[in-house]
Image (spheres, rainbow, N blue to C red):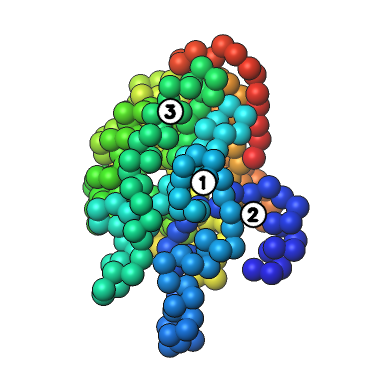
Amino acid sequence: MDELNGSVMSSVPYMVLVGNHEYECHSPACAASAERMNILRNFTAYNSRFQMPSKEVDGTLNMWYSFEHGPIHFTSISSETDYKGEPSNEFADPPRNGHFGDQLAWVEADLKKADANRGNVPWLIVGMHRPLYDVSGCPNGVPADHNANIQAAFEDLFIKYRVDVVLTGHQHYYERQTPILNSTAVLDGVSSDFARYDNPKAPVYIVSGACGTVEGLDMAPDPTNVTWNAASNYIDYGFSTLEANRSKLSWKFLNSSNQAVLDEFVMWKTSPSTEGCSDAISA
């Protein structure tokens, strides 16, 4: 962590969102130490190390917050706590994680405000750690277990407020889905090669979790078991880039070793209104 702080985090802008590693012990030494367990319980270290702009948007610590950059409104939420079936207390008896507040009420208020502001900031992207739609978590294309709990809590809000993209990680591989509405692929405006989405009618879900881990890449699921997988890569470590202006969003997944482009697509938006500023970003 100190090396990362010195070489990257001190010079490159970054934002963080919460995942399962922010409250779990992943070593025998930690599990055997009551002191270490107490220090790491309920996201204490995570919320002490970072300071995201939650106060500015009535969010909560680093658990959920939002910000705008260029033509995109980013909403960062917790897939770990504070909704029915959340996973952080799955093995905690008595429950010791969460209780940070009414996350769902905040998410709806934030998405509603962002959707009403499309004339100024046309894109709406949600980030969360665990995926709603990934092949391994959706037998026959339907979310199960934790995925189903996330779907029950959040999907109606994503649809209601016309979220454009949902970015996730957790799984140690890369997947890009078609637009999805209640477990069904929505292919209106999607090109036959899945490389272009014109005014998609449902959120696009992306799993970008292959950047690197001591645990290695996850075992490859079978993407032919679902109808909504547009692209997948289970063998390469890689990272993703995003560029956007008011009418076009460009996404790429690149090989970490040689920066070769392993997947890419563009999304075009002609509505809501694209009148106004012409801010562009790349990240």
Q: Residues under labels 3 and 1: Cα distance?
A: 15 Å
Q: Which mark is residue 256?
A: 2
Of the numbered discs 2 and 1, the one sitting upstream in the chain is 1
Q: Quadrant of residue 82?
A: bottom left
Residue named by callout 3:
113
Q: Quadrant of residue 264?
A: top right
Q: Residue at x 32, y 31 (%)?
A: 159
Q: How many marks?
A: 3
Q: Looking at the picture, tell me which residue is in the foreground, 66 or 21.
A: 66
Q: Residue at x 29, y 69 (%)?
A: 95
Residue named by callout 1:
54
Q: Amino acid at mark 3?
A: Lys
Q: Residue at x 70, y 63 (%)?
A: 5
Of the numbered discs 3 and 1, the one sitting upstream in the chain is 1
Q: Specify whether 39 is left or right of 106.
A: right
Q: Quadrant of residue 34?
A: bottom left
Of the numbered discs 3 and 2, the one sitting upstream in the chain is 3
**272 up-or-down from 35: above or below:** above
Provide residue 165's location: percent of width, then percent of height: 45, 35
**Quick check: marks 3 and 2 in contact, CB under 8 Å?**
no
Q: Residues within 10 Å of mark 2 (few under 14, many from 20)?
A: some
